[in-house]
Each structure stands twice: as C-alpha cells, then as structure tokens.
Image: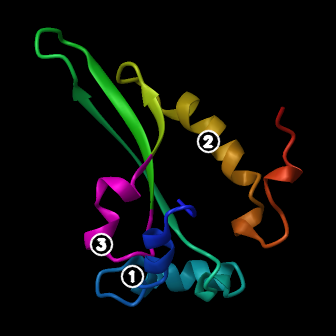
Amino acid sequence: MFHDKTWCQLRTHGRALSGSLYTSPEAERLNAAVGGILDQPHVSLYEIGADFGQVFVNKQHSTGVIGIRCLDIPFHHRTKRRFLHILGIIPEEPANMDPFLAPLREELACAGPCGSPGEGFSSCNTP
C-alpha cells in the first residue's frame, strides 16, 4: 500500500468525514484505550473482510477471498479495487474461519501492540 503515491496522499483525508469510524463513539473508546495514538498521522485503522462466491458457472464450488483496506481514506476511494489488497484465497467456504485468521492475527501482532512505533516485523519470530 505504501508504494502507491495516491494512497499515501489520501491517507488521513477520510477521518473527519461523516460516517467514518474515526468519528464514532467506538473510535473515541479505542483512542482512549491506546493513549490517544489514533489521532497521529502515522497510525491508521484497517478493515479485514472475507467474501465468498461461485467462481465457476458449471460447478457448485465456492471460493473465498480475505482482503484488507485502510479506513482513513475517503470511502469512495477505499472501495476501489486498487486500494483493496488480497491477503489470502480460501478454496471453499469453511465452517470456521479461525484457521485462516489465526496466522493473520499472528503476523499483525508482530507490528507491535496497536502498531506502536519502533516495534516492527523484525521483532517477529518468523523464518
């Protein structure tokens, strides 16, 4: 995401817009819980979602995609395909998403608690 000049320019411009998570009571609660760092320009909130669909017309088989998008760019940009990044593809709809989300949670935890500056992926125990 950070290699996209347009995305970098749009960051933080969607925070004050009506309907933004940043203007909600939940954001105020989260911001207080993490010491007010959500207001910092180097901190962003991200949304992770999954969607499933039938890829093949002649076969009954559902395939899923896990994606991530930044919540502090304006909504009309956030929904564009170029700003949605695929994190994984799931071959069929599972009964439980935990096996797919657990590795993602571990990877994101490596960024530090709440994305604390100074704690990066280098502190992970990854190969």
Give the vertical position of 112 relative to 76 (above or below). above
Task: Say what secondary structure mark 3 lies in.
Answer: helix
Instruction: State if disc 2 and disc 1 touch (CB < 8 Å).
Output: no
Q: Is residue 95 left or right of residue 41?
A: left
Q: For the residue marked with disc 3, what is the amino acid? A: Phe
Q: What's the residue at 62%, 37% (across, down)?
A: 102
> Which comes before the other along the chain, label 3 or label 2?
3
- Distance from disc 1 to disc 3, alpha carbons, whole Å, reads 7 Å
Q: For the residue marked with disc 2, what is the amino acid? A: Leu
- What are the residue bounds of the magenta stretch? 70-85
Q: Does the stretch in magenta take in 84?
A: yes
Q: For the residue marked with disc 1, what is the amino acid? A: Gly
Q: Residue 63 at x, y = what percent?
A: 32, 24
Instruction: State the residue in front, 29 or 80.
Output: 80
Q: Which mark is residue 75?
A: 3
> Which comes before the other along the chain, label 1 or label 2?
1
Task: Say what secondary structure mark 2 lies in.
Answer: helix
Q: Quadrant of residue 111?
A: bottom right
Number of marks in the image?
3
Instruction: State if disc 3 and disc 1 touch (CB < 8 Å).
Output: yes
Q: Quadrant of residue 93?
A: top left
Give the vertical position of 101 relative to 61 (above or below). below
| Mark 1 lies on residue | 14
| Mark 2 lies on residue | 104
